[in-house]
Image (cartoon, helix red, strand yellow):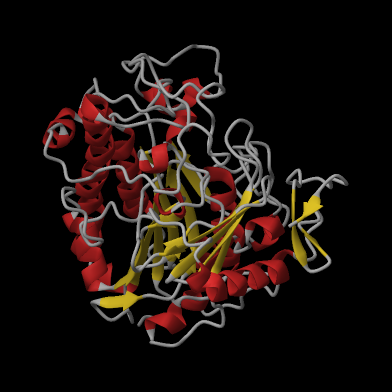
Amino acid sequence: MPDRPNIILVMTDQQRADCLGRAGHPDLLTPNLDGLSHAGAFFRNAYSECPICIPARHAVMTGKRPQNSGVTGFAAHARIADEANTLPNLLRRAGYQTASVGRNMHTYPHYRRYGFETVDHNQDRFYRDHPEVQPLSNTGGIWSDWPHEHDHGLSPSGITARPWPFEERLHETNVSIRKALDFLDHRDRESPFFLYVGTVAPHPPLLPPACYYDRYDRDDLAHEPRVGAWLDTDRDPLLCSPTRQPPHSIQEPRVVLEGHQRRSTLAGYLGLINHFDDQFQLLLMRLASEGIADDTVIIFTSDHGEMLGDHHCFRKSMPYEGAAHIPFLMRGPGIDPHTVVDQPAALMDILPTCCDLAHIDTPADVDGSSLLPPLRGERLDRPYVHGTHCAMSGAHGGFHYLVDGRHKYIWWVGPGTEQLFDLEADPYETCDLAADPAQTSPLERFRAALIERIADAPEGFVRDAKLVSGIAYGSHNTNATIV
């Protein structure tokens, strides 16, 4: 291994862990990502600590879990408090050339670089460079700055899909990869580099180029939404009720995907991933042609997943596998081919892993762990990943979850209800074991572990060594009751 390898962090947005051929998807073509995992490591149990974009990306940038980064939900104006110790700043001070291209890291304000020496984000000047793509408005509003949002009529959060209506070279995924190649063309050849490459895909709007949409626009797709036997569609308190969130709205998080709507949504979503995979090959080819593939570590992951109709949910922000379980691959010098890691991994592990690769000290207040020891077959001193999300209006009252690679435990803060799933026997969480007397031991073990983890949280989740329901997540509530 070179003393300090180049590091490329590639992040798609909203990609499920099972949406890889390597993960056994029956329909989706991802040969380049599959090849990356076979040439290196496949982390089978990687999770987003807060399955929504901003806190997930803060975990990457800070190496901290949501409670310690200060962001436990969608907080558009959340700054990174410790700018000096962001991932790019740590590597920059160690002599790395740092750059961010494509879809930005959703940091605020957008002009803050947080340690990236150069940034070339798609939303910064896309319409100036490509006026042939009509934006939603000319007001400079938040949505009009993004290259994937214009007059096609599709929602940036909805289930509708159609082929990309412009030249493929103008697609946001193509632009992101092209900017990565441009960085490689102009980089400092005498310094190692850290390059972050982001894409919006497969986040809606579901707009793959036509050939990718057409490839999956068929009725024989094996990918079916999974619906838990524990789910009461009309009265389940964990989901939006039909009266508050009409299930036929294209933007609401509660939806029944079936028939032609299911087929179209899947064609858009899977098509975007297949399209990204083909574009990703251009980056791999460039590294090989320049002779630096063997000197470069590639980390591929996503900020969170997509429910894609599972348990009648769409989008993210849920503790279930569709939203919380993410793809995580690594390839590079010193990483043995065909490595499979079953220990739970998380986004906060990226920062200490990169510090380990660069042979620099990880800040003492970082919560994540370097993933290099598991690549050598060593165990992390961490039995589980802890995930959370604060209350979302009309969707849920917040949750905490623990996952150890075998079981997942969920505690819903508002109603105080618990769920327990055996992910080996039931990978899509269709059978809730929380009320099964035979599962009392793991339920109590996870409950005790969660109590220990959040006992000192300012919200008051724990009182008298017991979990407290009725908490207004993020504020103290004297009317809470112990369960």
In this rendering, position of residue 451 left or right of residue 422: right
**Residue located at (44% from left, 24% from top):** 247
Q: Residue at x 21, y 59 (%)?
A: 24
Q: Where is residue 268 in the image (x, y as percent from the top left)?
A: 26, 33
Which quarter of the image is occupied by the N terminus? Answer: bottom left
Name the side, left or right, on which 395 lies relative to 340: right
Say which of 417 and 342 sits in front: 417
Closest to the observer: 384 or 128? 384
Q: Where is residue 446 in the image (x, y as percent from the top left)?
A: 59, 70
Q: Is residue 247 left or right of residue 78?
A: left
Looking at the image, the residue that sits furthest to the front is 437
Q: Can the viewer see residue 208 in this picture?
A: no
Image quadrant where one finds the C terminus: bottom right
Residue 207 versus residue 81 in the image, above or below: above
Q: In this orientation, does residue 159 appear? A: yes
Which residue is at the front of the view, 431 or 62? Answer: 431
Q: Which residue lies furthest to the right in this view?
A: 478
Q: Position of residue 51 (x, y in %)?
A: 52, 49
| Towards the viewer: 365 or 102 | 365
Seen at 56% across and 19% down, the residue is 141
Q: Where 69 falls versus 126 (above or below)?
A: below
Residue 146 at x, y = what percent? 44, 27
Q: How many marks?
A: 0
Q: In which quarter of the image is residue 275?
A: top left
In the displayed structure, would residue 43 be above or below residue 118? below
